[in-house]
Image (cartoon, rainbow, N blue to C red):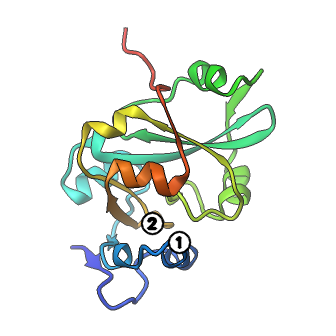
Amino acid sequence: MTTTDTDGSGAAHPRFAEALRELGLDGLTAQVRRFPDATRTAAEAAAAIGCELSQICKSLIFVADGVPVLVLMDGASRVDLERVREELGAAKVTRAKAEVVREATGYAIGGVPPFGHRTKTRVLADRSLFAHDLVWAAAGTPYAVFPITPKDLVAYAGATLVDVRERIA
């Protein structure tokens, strides 16, 4: 069972719903789908939506030389930290701790949307997201997702398009 936010009742996190309004994306608010069970992981989200794992957009926070950076990655792939480090010209890149994620974005891990964050961070979007016409991303909670085209995702997130996916040997 899913709930769609057709009446503005708030399937999306309030901060994210406000970000959609500020960006002129009010129409996306109605497309947010809320699930009774968590969609915290890409696998949970894909199963709930009924889509391919690679159609899920993961919003992952890393720390590059002490500065948070957001990486948007398809749900079937892993981020290669060395490729992120090279892309950013950083000395060191690590996965952010939960408190850093919440401080930088305003959201908890498992519900971080691709934009509408508390602070402005650098955003990298992996080209793998363009394998689909539509992807699904978190809407600010571990229970809500929304559909968006990869082109719009990159544009609204202010992302740089990169290749930071782990290569399969």
Position of residue 159 in the picture relative to residue 45 (left or right):
right
- Marks 1 and 2 close (CB-CB < 8 Å): yes
Q: Quadrant of residue 102?
A: bottom right
Q: Secondary structure at mark 2?
A: loop
Residue 161 vertical position relative to residue 59 in the rendered view, above or below: above
Circle 2 residues within 10 Å: few <14, some 14–19, many ≥20? many
Q: Quadrant of residue 137?
A: bottom left
Q: Secondary structure at mark 1?
A: helix
Say which residue label 2 marks: 139
Residue 110 visible, this orientation: no
Gap in angstroms between the C-alphas marked 1 and 2: 6 Å
Q: Residue furthest top?
A: 169
Image point (49%, 79%), residue name: 21
Image point (69%, 31%), residue name: 94
Horizontal and vertical percent for residue 89? Answer: 71, 23
If the image is split into quadrants, where does the C terminus sit?
A: top left
Tag of residue 58: none
If the image is split into quadrants, where does the N terminus sit?
A: bottom left
Horizontal and vertical percent for residue 60? Answer: 55, 44
Horizontal and vertical percent for residue 74? Answer: 38, 39
User: Number of marks in the image?
Assistant: 2
Image point (33%, 91%), residue name: 7
Residue 144 visible, this orientation: yes
Say which residue label 1 marks: 16
Horizontal and vertical percent for residue 77? Answer: 39, 31
Q: Quadrant of residue 31?
A: bottom left
Position of residue 86 in the picture relative to residue 129 (left or right):
right
